[in-house]
Image (cartoon, grey):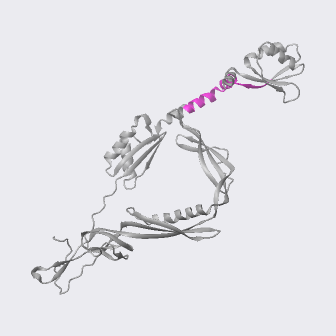
């Protein structure tokens, strides 16, 4: 690598020697200590082809005098020739340098502001706070303190619980997390606590109302667990009245779940075929530009494929942000193949599918106490598995009550309220 770099810096010539005796001329060069590289027969006609340093060209011409060997320069490589070409195009070089300087200058400004995570807090309110802190399209990046801007959002907008600001080149990414809404107070209308599904009662903890079931009982969906009709004694001992309240409490029950699922022994799978198709695009100061080749409107020549974006020229280099990055979008063709799996693997797949169906029905506070499975179908094509699960969970839900006047029409004690109130 070091030799190639040195030759590139010094300048290298690709020459052809024809006519006379070019072998003798090469021997003379070697005898005088002039190095040559890649010596081989010439591609066009007779003669030899070789590479020579630019500094050794006068020695070659001196030794070639009187030998009848014609020396022809085929190619000029290296920094000296590149510098000569650039000096001949001073306007193009100056324009390129000016364009790079302009890109670097523009990359130090914020041109785009993206806000994520806001639903209740309006985008306009967030943008107003950002603008007050100096973060707006056209802001100079070194003058923007992301931590200070995030703190200002948190202080100025009560609906924001957390905020962060990140500068990615010319893009300012603002992410916020809103505060959870305060749940409304529980309604005070009379209600019963009823079972939301069939279960076996494990524990009853009534905060308000009268329990109607005991641990160990089997209840059906809709059955009253804690009633909101509380009998009370009337003044003067003239019988009992009813106080209508909103029953509250916690009822734990043992709930049973079951699900059935099948898994085929022969299944289709998408696998890479080995063929790929690539596009190139340039990301310039936050803007993505499709390169001219292949044409951006040309669809990938595959019916099925997987898309992957590769960073060829990264936008970050040794901790420095560059305004330009080169990306390759690769489309890898996929094809469908049929695979056969072991019956035990199919059984595990069916069990996992059935278990996933049960877990979608489980409430978050459910505690699994027992589970099992058994194979109920096994054919040359598929395996069927039934999964059963038992959990301890909250089974009570509120159901509204309509207060009714007690017999006798007195109506005393029928007004909704709380015991002792």
The x, y position of residue 214, in whole percent, is: 29, 74
The x, y position of residue 255, in whole percent, is: 40, 70
The x, y position of residue 305, in whole percent, is: 64, 54
Observer able to see residue 216: yes
Q: 18 and 407: which one is in front?
A: 407
Q: Is residue 266 magenta?
A: no
Q: Which residues are magenta?
A: 73-100
Q: Exactly how many numbered labels are in the figure?
A: 0
Left or right: where 357 falls relative to 94: left
Q: 245 and 380: which one is in front?
A: 380
Q: 419 and 333: which one is in front?
A: 419
Instruction: Answer with the quarter of the image where residue 2 lies.
Output: top right
Magenta stretch mostly in which secondary structure?
A: helix
**Residue at 38 percent of width and 48 percent of height:** 126
Q: 356 and 67: which one is in front?
A: 356
Compared to residue 239, the image places residue 245 above or below, namely above
Observer able to see residue 360: no
Left or right: where 133 falls relative to 317: left
**Residue at 75 percent of width and 23 percent of height:** 13
Q: Quadrant of the N terminus?
A: top right
Compared to residue 256, the image places residue 317 above or below, namely above
For this orientation, the residue located farthest to the bottom is 408
Q: Is residue 77 magenta?
A: yes
Q: Quadrant of the C terminus?
A: bottom left
For this orientation, the residue located farthest to the left is 236
**Residue at 55 percent of width and 65 percent of height:** 350
Compared to residue 244, the image places residue 28 above or below, namely above
The x, y position of residue 320, in whole percent, is: 51, 33
């Amino acid at each position: 690598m070091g030799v190639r770099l040195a030759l590139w810096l010094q300048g290298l010539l690709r020459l052809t020697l024809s006519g006379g005796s070019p072998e003798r001329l090469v021997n003379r060069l070697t005898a005088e200590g002039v190095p040559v590289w890649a010596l081989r027969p010439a591609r066009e006609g007779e003669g030899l082809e070789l590479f020579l340093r630019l500094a050794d060209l006068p020695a070659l011409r001196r030794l070639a005098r009187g030998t009848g060997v014609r020396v022809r320069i085929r190619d000029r490589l290296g920094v000296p020739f590149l510098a000569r070409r650039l000096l001949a195009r001073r306007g193009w070089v100056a324009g390129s340098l000016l364009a790079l300087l302009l890109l670097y200058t523009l990359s130090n400004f914020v041109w785009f502001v993206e806000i994520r995570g806001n639903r209740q807090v309006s985008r306009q309110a967030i943008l107003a706070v950002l603008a007050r802190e100096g973060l707006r399209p056209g802001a100079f990046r070194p003058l923007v303190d992301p931590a200070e801007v995030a703190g200002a959002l948190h202080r100025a907008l009560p609906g924001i619980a957390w905020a962060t600001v990140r500068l990615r080149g010319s893009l300012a990414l603002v992410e916020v997390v809103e505060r959870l809404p305060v749940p409304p107070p529980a309604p005070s209308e009379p209600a019963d606590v009823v079972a939301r599904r069939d279960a076996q009662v494990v524990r009853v903890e009534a905060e308000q109302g009268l329990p109607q079931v005991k641990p160990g009982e089997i209840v059906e969906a809709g059955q009253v667990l804690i009633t909101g009709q509380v009998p009370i004694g009337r003044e003067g001992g003239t019988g009992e009245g009813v106080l209508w309240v909103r029953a509250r409490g916690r009822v734990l029950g043992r709930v049973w779940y079951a699900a059935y699922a099948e898994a085929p022994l022969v299944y289709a799978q998408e696998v890479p075929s080995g063929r790929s198709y690539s596009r190139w695009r340039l990301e310039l100061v936050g803007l993505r530009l499709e390169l001219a080749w292949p044409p951006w409107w040309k669809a990938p020549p595959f019916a099925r494929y997987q898309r992957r974006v590769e960073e060829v020229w990264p936008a970050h280099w040794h901790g420095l942000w560059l305004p330009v990055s080169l990306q390759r979008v690769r489309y890898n063709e996929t094809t469908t193949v049929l695979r056969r799996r072991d019956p035990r693997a199919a059984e595990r797949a069916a069990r996992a599918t059935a278990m996933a169906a049960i877990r979608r029905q489980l409430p978050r506070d459910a505690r699994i106490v027992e589970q099992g499975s058994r194979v109920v179908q096994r054919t040359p094509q598929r395996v069927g598995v039934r999964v059963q699960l038992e959990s301890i969970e909250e089974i009570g839900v509120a159901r509204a009550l309509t207060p009714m006047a007690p017999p006798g029409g007195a109506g005393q004690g029928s007004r909704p309220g709380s015991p002792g109130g």
